[in-house]
Image (cartoon, coloured by chain):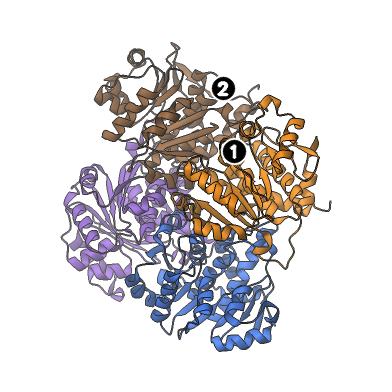
Chain colours: A orange, B blue, C purple, D brown
């Protein structure tokens, strides 16, 4: 396997051009957050904003509007029951995230199906958490778009049919080819199987201090922000995976546990360092 | 074009007189924030408070009350459906901002019309975002008061009829004269066409790290706070434009993206520096 | 007039005794915060907690519960419509604050009357803002308890009948004697007329950077916390007035405007310094 | 009595194994927070998350969802009226906390009874605050599970029948034996009576700066996080008691009062120090 290192991040995060505006840095929609798991979509949405996406809209249960805006006035919100607005806005996005805190009930299924039927070919769809489980349990047909799956090992077992012990690079790659999307299998050393390259990648950063709820939701937001902004999608995915873990490694020097919200607030500073050393 | 530099900020922000109270530093009303765009009015209102306005009242959808107060207990709130209170309080204000997160539906139009019919001749009205689009699409007659428009280039196209490529100083000035208000065309080098002076101004500060949602909403709040406090309105407008970008430039030294809420929290410190060097 | 200086603060804030519990440091109830002015009661309540009161309960419109707890999980809340709970809990308090953001409508008046009829002789009642205006406009009879009034100059005019120009120490003292409570007339040099002492006091701290909304609400919370904790009520009042302004003076060295919420977060540190130098 | 010192904390908090995930560090459920006391359960839940528990679910009145998530997106929430979800999820937890801000009305009693009837033998149940009072007043039969009681002295009087003056180690131990659970009697020098050891322990850390509301709620969350993560439950309890007070001692060097939320945010750093000195 190829190693994911800081070199990729430095290659990916480039200095911004002076003549640009918020539209230049991509539109992201995050879909999830039912009544029980609102925190998950707050983290994913916050990560997309702090990672530099220019415009971020969060589709969630209205019970989560106040807490989201209390933390992040920079994002916009749409009710997860407002199918009309979703259908209208979703096609204008560069990247859509579905899954963080989505849940697995009937309403969640309908929202996932609406997303699948509305997404356009040129868009990128990041599928996480409950959305992965719903696809597995309901044998949903995947849409024809740029797909990125971000399962942890148990979710990957559900989607791929591979027990954790059989999740070898070779087996993972075989299932990836059927899914026709990029697959990110999250673990203490996350693996990435890119859809448009035969190389398999393994993360070299990461710490047990990250083993806490909301960490995966945060990764989806960083991936969304990076893919929305940077030219090369594959590099963006790899750089996001590394960035997420590397900030945690840094914080873990002084913290027993690293909270997802702490990683998020450190994104702008870490990214600035990487952009400045782009030509080193 | 004249250059907007720190000199203007130093001339504008004067040391406060010992014998003063909150009424001395102006009353500001911010109107906007529907169910979808609540964050925009939170940012605009916060900027007005941190810029030093003595008393700030936010008119918004009640769904935004909790998030606004969680971030900013210093502001007061009124429901955007409470026409009676708006009619009663609006004429007591020094500056009114309308537009951030207002939206463009029927309710937004009614609120804009209510504002136009209530505002008094001696007050200042800052018109931003959706309010600009509503004026353009509904051909609304402008009220007779001190007007400040803060369009980005696309909104300016809608209002002026000038395609972005034809937004030259000469053309912009011609439209400004018809509007009879100050026009601030936001871009990576924002331009200001003052209503009561023939000089055209271009900002010398600003960074691509500012290209993110909510940045314009924040500028309106700073302008409101400055106009409410400082004697010379033209200087106040120019100083606000520079201050907003200069703080971002400072933060961008260490951050890849600068969030509007971060600019807001740095206002008191930057303003103190400017006031202290007033006679340098 | 006597000068209020740091000496009084050092005399007042004593080191805490090892053998103590939260009940030792007093129970405070803050009453106020209608739908429009929720921020005021959030500030007052926060100040009481950060000033060291052991147990603080906030009586407010339920619309303010979420924002209060988002900022201050240390406080308890009761609906301002829950007369039963108020009647039951109010007599168990050491200090009650009424007024910050209370408003002046019929519901506010009823709440004020309920407070007047429930408060006990040995308790301290701090009367601020709208509560002062309501007393003046409705000629309410004051309850027989330890009263502290905290009007700004306009509110003092309403309550005392003295135009601002005639608010001389001699005149103020005369009205104070009729009110039979301590009177704190807030201005850039706040004056204190103690109920149980003939000395008149003037604050030596304070800055124009404090001239912003919510500042008075914050002072009431600090007074409540100090009176609830410290043995000598008169000293507690004077020390609170000075502490509030002195922290602002300190922050104003680097800030053009000082926000009430910033003063609040600095209370524990300033108080620690004063307690440590108690015997200097 | 044995002394609780930092040595126990160092022995308890071990470096995390690289190969781990959020499930490795335990599932915690916190139950409490009615309409009046929502802050208590926010503090308890936050403490469990910052203490390192991998997955934390808060069962509370839905009025507290927004404030909880505004502070802590890392936690999940369930309505305290959703008995179905509680019954389904509670048995999957490692540790359950019941009591912080629970209140003592009929609904609180039903929730306590539901918890008692649902909890499994191998789980740990921490009983705090109002839950202790409810057991005493309703003579509830305790469930057969690992029990930890965290009364302050007045609550211990209610539960044990011992007046505060008679709460000697010998008497406390006798009642503890009947309860068949670990008992933590909170005071300025908290005492611990472990269920599976005859040693009695007294805390050597703690400060009068901790005498403020919400402090006990915070302790329950730390205990829950430690018991969920660390192998030896008795050590985990002792280490949690010390950690809570030791962080407060540290903060009290510069603060007159230490707020519970400040202790919470310092947990990851203190725990990292202890883990690093584990072999010193």
Task: Identify which residue is drawn at 60% across, 28% down.
Answer: D274
Chain of the residue under label 1: A
> Tag 2: Cα neighbours inside 10 Å, few (<14), some, or many (≥20)?
many
In the figure, C225 relative to D54: above or below?
Answer: below
Place residue C168 in its image quadrant.
Answer: bottom left
Q: CA distance from mark 2 to mark 1?
A: 46 Å
* Quadrant showing the N terminus of chain C: bottom left
Between B99 and A185, which is closer to the camera in this rendering?
A185
Left or right placement of residue D275 versus residue A174 in this view: left
Task: Identify which residue is drawn at 24% across, 48% down.
Answer: C82
Q: Residue furthest top?
A: D198
In the figure, B235 relative to D43: above or below?
Answer: below
> Tag 1: Cα neighbours inside 10 Å, few (<14), some, or many (≥20)?
few
Evaluate whether label 2 is on the same chain as label 1.
no
- The nearer-to-camera label among 2 and 1 is 1
Chain of the residue under label 2: D
Task: Identify which residue is drawn at 33% across, 70% down.
Answer: B85
Task: Identify which residue is drawn at 73% across, 49% down.
Answer: A236
- What is the x, y in percent for residue D41? 41, 37
Between C101 and D83, which is closer to the camera in this rendering?
D83
Q: Kindly identify which numbered label has been placed on residue A139.
A: 1
Identify the residue under disc 2: D12
In the figure, B278 relative to A143: above or below?
Answer: below
Left or right placement of residue D59 versus residue C28 in this view: right
The secondary structure type at the circle numbered 1 is: loop
Between B42 and A93, which is closer to the camera in this rendering?
A93
């Amino acid at each position: 396997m190829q190693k994911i290192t800081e070199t990729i991040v430095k290659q990916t995060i480039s200095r911004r051009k002076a003549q640009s505006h918020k539209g230049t840095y991509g539109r992201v929609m995050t879909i999830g957050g039912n009544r029980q798991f609102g925190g998950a979509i707050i983290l994913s949405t916050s990560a997309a904003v702090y990672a530099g996406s220019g415009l971020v809209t969060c589709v969630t249960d209205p019970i989560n509007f106040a807490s989201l805006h209390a933390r992040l006035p920079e994002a916009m919100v749409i009710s997860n029951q407002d199918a009309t607005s979703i259908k209208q806005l979703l096609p204008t996005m560069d990247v859509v995230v579905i899954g963080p805190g989505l849940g697995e009930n009937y309403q969640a299924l309908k929202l996932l199906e609406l997303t699948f039927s509305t997404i356009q070919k040129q868009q990128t769809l990041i599928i996480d958490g409950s959305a992965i489980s719903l696809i597995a349990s309901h044998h949903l047909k995947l849409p024809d778009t740029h797909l990125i799956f971000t399962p942890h090992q148990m979710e990957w077992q559900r989607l791929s049919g591979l027990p954790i012990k059989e999740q070898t690079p070779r087996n993972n790659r075989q299932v990836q080819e059927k899914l026709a999307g990029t697959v990110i299998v999250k673990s203490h050393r996350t693996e990435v199987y890119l859809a448009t390259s035969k190389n398999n990648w393994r993360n070299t950063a990461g710490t047990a201090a990250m083993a806490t709820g909301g960490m995966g939701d945060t990764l989806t937001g960083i991936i969304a922000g990076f893919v929305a902004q940077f030219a090369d999608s594959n590099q963006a995915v790899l750089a996001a995976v590394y960035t997420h873990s590397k900030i945690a490694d840094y914080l873990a020097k002084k913290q027993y546990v690293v909270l997802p919200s702490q990683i998020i607030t450190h994104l702008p500073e870490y990214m600035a360092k990487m952009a400045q050393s782009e030509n080193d």
